[in-house]
Amino acid sequence: MKAAVYTRYGPPDVVQIQDVEKPVPKDNEILIDVRAASVNPLDWHFMRGDVRLLTGVLAPKHKVLGAEIAGRVEAVGKDVKQFQPGDEVFGGLFGGKGMGGFAEYACSIEERLALKPAAISFEEAAGATVAALTALQGLRDKGADPARPKGFGRWRVWRCGYVRGPDCQIVRR
């Protein structure tokens, strides 16, 4: 399968399209045929090596970026209860395996996925994970005021607007 791979930290040109092995889901994992993936600051920080304690001190431990995806379930591990092959899902990949959404297939766990509503596209669903859920959490749980000049709540609201903004480009495979 094709994937956007990085083997060293640096600017965007360290990312190359390469053939890699298709992941095999563990007993508690879901294999997803990735139809859309969003790009967010987490990918940028990982690529640059800003968080090396998470990603590997000298070089990246996990070679494929992409934390937010939407796609169709291709296979499930024997312990998976919520999803079955054919389900359309969206969610996050960040966790034990790193990321991996900038590939044709990726694995995740049940707790990081949800069924994609039929009324939205794969592209909309992929952009509605970390960014939009963080904004929603800030507004619901913390009572963030978007009019405040400073504070994390304002950043959350900005991120939500960024994902749905008119300058956002969608790339389809």
Image (spheres, rainbow, N blue to C red):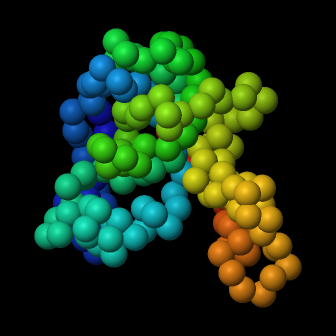
Q: Nearer the viewer, residue 36 or 84?
A: 84
What residue lies at 22% left-to-right and 38% top-to-bottom? 20
Residue 57 placed where, x, y %?
17, 69
Numbered label tally = 0
What residue lies at 74% left-to-right and 34% top-to-bottom? 120
| Quarter placement of the N terminus | top left
- Return the residue found at the far left: 58
What residue lies at 52% left-to-right and 17% top-to-bottom? 83
In the image, residue 37 sits, relative to residue 73, either above or below, namely below
Residue 19 placed where, x, y %?
23, 40
Can residue 97 be seen in the rendering of this structure?
Answer: yes
What residue lies at 20% left-to-right and 63% top-to-bottom? 56
Q: Quadrant of residue 140?
A: bottom right
Residue 10 placed where, x, y %?
28, 74
Horizontal placement of 68 versus 99: left or right?
right
Horizontal placement of 135 versus 110: left or right?
right
